[in-house]
Image (cartoon, rainbow, N blue to C red):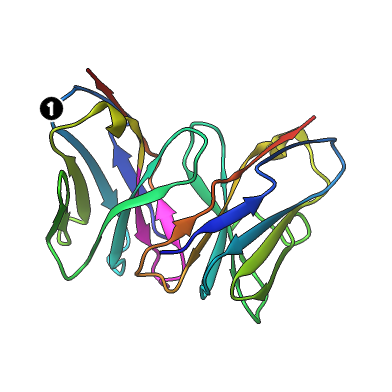
Amino acid sequence: SAVISQKPSRDICQRGTSLTIQCQVDSQVTMMFWYRQQPGQSLTLIATANQGSEATYESGFVIDKFPISRPNLTFSTLTVSNMSPEDSSIYLCSGTPNMDTEAFFGQGTRLTVV
Amino acid sequence: GENVEQHPSTLSVQEGDSAVIKCTYSDSASNYFPWYKQELGKGPQLIIDIRSNVGEKKDQRIAVTLNKTAKHFSLHITETQPEDSAVYFCAANNQAGTALIFGKGTTLSVSS
């Protein structure tokens, strides 16, 4: 199994600013994902990040708003840019060797935009 | 794209009873179906998964069944305990096999 650490675990940010969330995996994973989860809701996929290629964004999410880096097989970052209160949510990082084996999750980053 | 429906949204049982959560998926190409448990303030944790070449899988008090023809799969928890109280999510991989699509979740409450 893999352990995924996210930083920060929570933050309160001013609108108009940006926050970068870091995701560190203790083993190499081929695929990494970023999800958004509103309190009491399900997980919505933001994008898939694979090393050596541009992130693939889901409908409704764009690179200018959520730029992602994937410099190696154990690390990724998600930036939430030009934040508004609507961006307040829990952001989750996930990683897996391939898509028919277990996907591991970090503990999440609880973001509040004021 | 893939769509995963999950029922019920909430489930309350007495300790020792069984709990069943059901999910349906839309994409016949999906071949991997995990179940996650999420406790308050934590990330989802895999509790059991099943692949499309298997009809049933069991791990102690937890079992999952898959009906590929009907495109539905279910989580069964027997002899429930208060520590089973959490939100449970089903998921299916998408057609491209590149991501998991999650159901809306079931809040399970086990009272002693």
Tell me where the magenta segment starts and ends, as one range.
B89-102
In the picture, measured across the screen, residue B76 lies left or right of residue B11, that is: left
* A9 shown above or below B72: above
Count of marks placed on residues: 1
Residue A54 position in % (x across, y down) = 67, 75
In the image, B88: left or right of B78? right
Amino acid at dot 1: Asp
Residue at figure coordinates x 37%, y 63% from the top left? A102
State the residue at coordinates (78%, 38%): A84
**Which residue carries the number 1 mark?**
B17
- Which chain contains the residue that carries disc 1? B
Percent coordinates x, y for residue B99 in the rendering: 46, 64
**Magenta-drawn stretch contains A114:** no
Q: Residue at x 85, y 35 (%)?
A: A14
Residue B5, by quadrant, is top left
- Closer-to-camera residue (A24/B51): A24
Q: Residue B111: x percent and y percent?
A: 25, 19
Report the residue at 39% width, 59% height from top: B2
- Note whether residue A88 is visible: yes
Q: Residue lying farthest bottom?
A: A52
Q: Secondary structure at mark 1?
A: loop
Neighbor class of circle 1 (other Cα within 10 Å; few <14, some 14-19, many 20+) is some
